[in-house]
Amino acid sequence: MGLEKDKQNDRGEESDIQESGDERDGNMKRNTSETSLYTTEDEDSDGQEHNNKIQLGPQCTLKEHIEKDKDDESLRRWKEQLLGSVDINSVTETLDPEVKILSLSIVTTDRPAIILPIPEDGNPKGLWFTLKEGSHYSLKFSFTVSNNILSGFRYTNTVWKTGIKVDSRKAMLGTFSPQQEPYTYETPEESTPSGFLARGLYSARSKFVDDDNRCYLEINYTFDIRKDWANA
């Protein structure tokens, strides 16, 4: 996940693709833009973004969000659009949203989708999945949001081979209101590298965090690239 061929330029530097998304009928649409990749680890980058984030004031419960600025017609309409059909009486008086990642899968036209089991401790035992060299694939996941508004939700993925970072990317998913129906997201299609040097074992870390740097799921795993897909 997140590994793409021809990632390095002539100076050995890497590129980082950042995506942004909006909600639409329970799903997200994406707009991508390229940014430079810093040589620091993804955790350092996340920490720097968190420190530089503009402070917008004290955090509020969902009910407090609705009561604030209720006399402002434009804000009231914006909140109604954001919250949709949320039943205010059913939400709890809590500041933090509750986010659950329900499913993860690798989607490709070459074979049926690979369903990835999500371990409770976030650390799959052994090899988590296998990718075919030169194949095209995307990552699809679903999640639910409850209790409060989820702001600045993003997905990050970092890949290493033999201890060297070979890929890092972030996907900014957006802001989501609580609802019973799960949201779904599918990453843009990627291509695995091919050739003798590309094959082998990789380690990776995927994280789902919000703009307060709360981590809702962190997965540390290994995968490999082979000449062909593993048996379904």
Image (cartoon, rainbow, N blue to C red):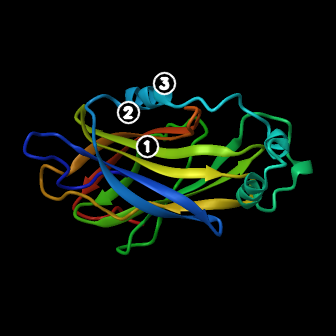
In the image, what residue occupies the spot 71% across and 31% down?
Answer: 59
Q: Nearer the viewer, mark 3 or mark 2?
A: 3
Which of the 4 quarters of the picture holds residue 85?
bottom right
**Location of residue 173 with respect to 53 vertically, above or below:** below
Question: Which one is nearer the viewer's eye here, 127 or 217?
Answer: 217
Mark 3 lies on residue: 51
**Where does residue 173 sit, x and y in percent of width and height?**
52, 52
**Where does residue 131 sit, x and y in percent of width and height?**
32, 58
> In the structure shown, which secondary structural element does the residue marked by tag 3 occupy?
helix
Mark 1 lies on residue: 156
Quarter that holds the C terminus: bottom left
Crowding at label 1, few (<14), some or many (≥20) Cα neighbours within 10 Å? many
In the image, what residue occupies the spot 65% across and 45% down?
Answer: 150
Which of the 4 quarters of the picture holds residue 110?
bottom left
Disc on the earlier residue, 3 or 2: 2
Crowding at label 3, few (<14), some or many (≥20) Cα neighbours within 10 Å? few
Alpha carbon distance from label 3 to label 2: 14 Å
Please state which amino acid type lies under the numbered disc 2. Asp
Alpha carbon distance from label 1 to label 2: 8 Å
Disc on the earlier residue, 1 or 2: 2
> In the structure shown, which secondary structural element does the residue marked by tag 2 occupy?
helix
**Location of residue 82 with respect to 135 vertically, above or below:** above
**Location of residue 153 with respect to 77 vertically, above or below:** above
Alpha carbon distance from label 1 to label 3: 18 Å
Q: Nearer the viewer, mark 1 or mark 3?
A: 3
